[in-house]
Image: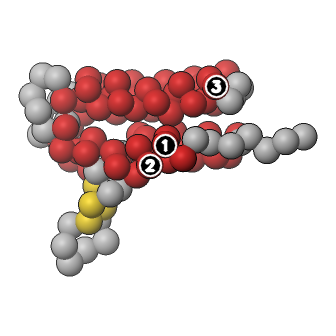
Amino acid sequence: MATKSISPNVERLVDLMDQRYRVPGTDLRFGLDALIGLVPGIGDFVGMLIGLAVLFEALRLRAPWLVVGRIVANLWLDAMVGAIPLVGDVWDFWFKANRRNLRLLREYA
């Protein structure tokens, strides 16, 4: 049985969205998702749309529906909680849906 390979482009996108930058003097990491989420009204929606790349990769790799469902749930949860003013901004720095989804996909692949 051949090992399924996750696209390097998806790996780079997840890094950019969730962990590319570090808060100086700490181990806290964040990405563009947390910054985009600061834009009122559309930021979390745009972040969710970008996060669909991992979902499409899961579908391309023919991941089981349980994995696909968990990816969708993480994206939805991130967008819904992220849309709450102030609470959502902190949530976006902590939850990192894209990393969670990539981990799910790696476990499958």
As measured in the structure, the alpha-carbon distance from the residue carrying label 2 to the one carrying label 1 is 5 Å
- Residues under numbered marks 3 and 1 in contact, where contact means CB atoms less than 8 Å apart: no
**Between residues 106 and 92, which one lies in front from this camera angle?**
106
Which residue does the numbered mark 3 point to in the structure image?
Answer: 60
Image quadrant containing the N terminus: top right
- Residues under numbered marks 2 and 1 in contact, where contact means CB atoms less than 8 Å apart: yes
The scheme the figure's colours follow is secondary structure
Horizontal relation, residue 75 to residue 92: left or right = right
Residue 16 visible, this angle: yes
**Dot 1: what SS?**
helix
Residue under the point 49% across and 43% down? 9
Q: Sequence order check: which comes first, mark 3 or mark 1?
A: 1
Residue under the point 58% across and 41% down? 7
Which residue does the numbered mark 2 point to in the structure image?
Answer: 12
Q: How many marks?
A: 3
| In the image, residue 7 above or below residue 56 | below
Q: Amino acid at mark 2?
A: Arg
Q: Amino acid at mark 1?
A: Asn
Q: Looking at the rendered structure, which numbered label has been put on residue 9?
A: 1
Q: Sequence order check: which comes first, mark 2 or mark 3?
A: 2
Q: Amino acid at mark 3?
A: Arg
Q: How many residues crowd around disc 2 within 10 Å: few (fewer than 14), some, or many (20 or more)?
A: few
Q: Looking at the rendered structure, which numbered label has been put on residue 63?
A: none
Image quadrant containing the C terminus: top right
Horizontal relation, residue 32 to residue 19: left or right = left
